[in-house]
Image (cartoon, helix red, strand yellow):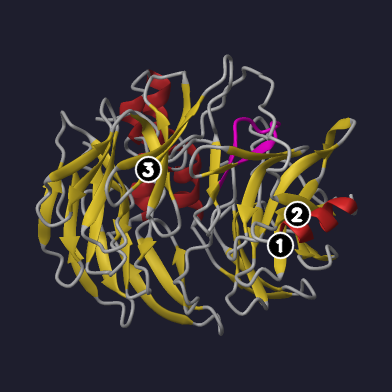
Amino acid sequence: MFRRLVVPLLLLSLVSFAPAQSEPGKQVAAIRHQLPEFRDISVWKGRAGLARFSPRGTFLAVSGKTADVAIYNSATGELVTKIDGKGFTAFSFSPDEKHVIAQNRADGSMTVYEIESGAHVRDIRGLGKVSNMSKLLGGAGIINELNGIFPVIVLEMGNVPATRDWKYLLVNKNDREFEIVDFVSGEHRYDIKHANFNSGWEAAKLTLAILGGVSGAGTAGYLMLGSISNPQFSANGRYLLIASGNKKPTLWKMEDGSMVSKFDSDSRIFYSKFSPDETMVATSDFDGITRIWKTENGELVTSIGSKKDEGVIAGWSTDSKKVFVNPTGKGDLAAYDALTGEKLYDFAGSASQGAIFSDDQSLVFTTPHKNKRVLFQVWETATGKLLATVPREKKQDAVITVKWNPNNKLIATADGFKKPVHVWNINGELVQVLENSTPPMEFSQDGTLLATGGVVPGQKKADNGYLWEFYLDQPERLAKVFLQY
């Protein structure tokens, strides 16, 4: 039974250090706009951060000071609108950049707003009260920490569960019953019955779990509860897999809501990833065993790992021929043949906390395993070739958050929520330290913009966001931008 967090790089470190300085002439970004309506991440207050661009980069949403979300125009830096809610846990832009949708922390319900006006469009019902209480006391916190899938504290707002084309939204009613809703009309399409639900039994489990915890049963008592669902849509939205902590994740066709298969596992399953070509899906269970299944009929293709060699699915190769599995104990990130389960190669020395892949899965960022002399490594996923090893300075914190530039040439990292963002190339060279910047951070889809949190110089407690512009191939334009600031 594995106990480590597989979501990578989210552990706090309290040791401070003097950050490395970028070399003159290497700077590739300048501040385009300041974002005064920005609220920072606060682990202690349970305050999640947000930095998210609309699909074409026209708008930028950030966690706001006087509202849950503030939306800026990326070109002008003007504040477009502010959106209040019940405390958002997820937020996304529609593909046409006309609407946004927010998911509320309190009950998992969703609300659709117009971007330009901030006007309320419609509400979509979420979890029932009993199920949400189960999540708060167990499913979304204690259980998931013990199973090593999600961090207890959510540091950044997630994405609203929707198909890539935003044709359908997935609404979680109680972790067992789900609803597919048409995004444009808000109309109900069909229901998905992932597992049997009985409100009386759910209430009884909640009571037994609380009594078990009070009486000293601890983990055993809380294991009575369900767990936050981890639904996964396939790349083109043809399939949906729901893994909500039971032993039988369900696979569905989105076209008509029919069930393809209910997978059999010896242990609870919390995590899944579809292959890019949608022909297979990988699941990882509580015992650390990863299984590959066919999406066409639900047949088992192969199994990877064992109770003595635990791991969790980390990603797929672009051609869908390999899977990458992270160890949950000792060992390295490794590549396996998706059809046979044969190990192909290791990413030697990579830590077991996780790995961050580039958007196209061709590169992977890893942290080292029990080696304080190395800050991070960069690898080529197709071959396992090590491209860079970045040394770690004395008393330097470990990296806590990573973002890949979509051009695959740059990586942005931060090693503390009040530490500046560092920009590196894939050869491990420090390109620039973005002074006064902090997480959260996010690149636009074309890679030319980076949104970060930050502070006002001379006012370390003053929150302030920044929009940075990158001029990788036009240094003369970058020089002109720097003259403005």
Q: Callout 2 environment at 10 Å: few (<14), some (14 to 19), or many (20+)? A: many
Between the C-alphas of marks 2 and 3, the distance is: 29 Å
Residue at horizontal 78 percent and vertical 75 percent from the top: 116
Q: Which residue is mark 3?
A: 379
Task: Give the residue furthest to the bottom.
Answer: 185
Q: Amino acid at mark 1?
A: Leu
Instruction: Classify mark 3: helix, strand or loop.
Output: strand
Residue 64 in view = no
What span is colored magenta in the figure?
411-423
Q: Amino acid at mark 3?
A: Trp
Residue at horizontal 47 percent and vertical 19 percent from the top: 373
Foreground of the two, 364 or 34: 364
The answer to whether 19 appears left or right of 234 in the picture is: right
- Residue 372, percent from left and from top: 46, 18
- Residue 1, percent from left and from top: 24, 30
* Circle nearer the viewer, 2 or 3: 3
Q: Quadrant of residue 384?
A: top left
Q: Quadrant of residue 419?
A: top right
* Circle nearer the viewer, 1 or 2: 2
Q: Which residue is mark 1?
A: 60
Q: Are marks 1 and 3 in contact (CB under 8 Å)?
A: no
- Residue 243, percent from left and from top: 31, 54
Residue at horizontal 53 percent and vertical 62 percent from the top: 160
Mark seen at residue 218? none
Foreground of the two, 228 or 92: 92
Q: Amino acid at mark 2?
A: Leu
Say if 10 sits above or below 343 in the image.
above
Q: Sequence order check: which comes first, mark 1 or mark 3?
A: 1
Foreground of the two, 312 or 456: 456
Residue at horizontal 28 percent and vertical 62 percent from the top: 275
Between the C-alphas of marks 1 and 3, the distance is: 31 Å
Q: Which residue is mark 2?
A: 467
